[in-house]
Amino acid sequence: MIGYYETDQGKVRIHNEDAGGVFKNDAGQVLAIVADGMGGHQAGDVASQMTTLHLHKKWQEATLIETPGEAEEWIKEAVRSANNEIKTYANDHEECAGMGTTVVVALCTGEFATIGHIGDSRCYFANSYGFKVITEDHSLVNELVRSGQITEEQAEHHPRKNVLLKALGTEFDLTADVKTMEFEENDRLLLCTDGLTNKVSDEELSELKSFEGEWSSFTRQMIDLANERGGEDNITLAVVHHHPSSDQKEGAE
């Protein structure tokens, strides 16, 4: 299995509030993480980095995960404990009051991948049959679309597009949405922040399903597209490719 992670500050922000990484355990299973921090007094980066470090530490301590049920329970508990750690820290540090972060996590084995998320960072899945988003944004505009109040086209330019209904660290005991799917040879996952999806269309991202080069070239191509179109936000993405003949690459911010 190959994993690749890359983040970019973008063209406007003075610092990068995104974090994440791709990590392998002793059993060869992969955990990919992408988090987009926000809020507080320049504390978004604190929340996203705390989330990544917490999940990575839990992953280092984890034993072999053999079933989807085990994977889903692991993600729920790891995300819940990360959330409570961030909320407690914010309560104890006035300068971090109001901070939070999105998170999307993929736990990948040789047979299945389990995805968990809170917020509007996304996970896409690609195989020989196609390409699709498999997470549902916890955002105001997505709820308006779901309820039929606005169209998807109107959502793209809605003035409250960035309003989240759910984010890590904003209240205690939040639970991630989780789902599991088969993960077979040559299947791919893309995890990313809205700094990418606000600038690069799903049609452009669907190159994921047929891309055959180095994954560093794919991630840089997508980041360059987002920056060429303004780059107003930080841009972060992680790819996991079920490619058993290749070595795992790691990266974390």
Image (cartoon, rainbow, N blue to C red):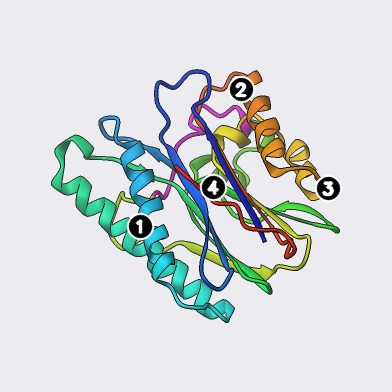
Question: Disc 4 and disc 2: Cα gap in Å?
Answer: 28 Å
Helix, strand or loop under label 1: helix
Residue flagged by tag 4: what amino acid is it? Glu
4 or 2: tag closer to the N-terminus: 4
Question: Which residue is labeled 1 in the image?
Answer: 54
Question: Disc 2 and disc 3: Cα gap in Å?
Answer: 23 Å
Question: Disc 3 and disc 4: Cα gap in Å?
Answer: 32 Å
Q: Which residues are magenta?
A: 156-167
Q: Does the residue at mark 4 contact the one at mark 2 (Cβ under 8 Å)?
A: no
Question: Which residue is labeled 4 in the image?
Answer: 143
Which of discs 3 and 4 lies nearer the camera? The answer is: 3
Q: Could you tell me residue 163's position as x and y percent?
A: 44, 37
Question: Disc 4 and disc 1: Cα gap in Å?
Answer: 30 Å
Residue at position x 67%, y 72% in the image:
110
Question: Which residue is labeled 2 in the image?
Answer: 227
Residue at position x 41%, y 35% in the image:
17
- Front residue of this view, candidates 8 and 213: 213
Helix, strand or loop under label 3: loop
Q: Residues within 10 Å of mark 2 (few under 14, many from 20)?
A: many
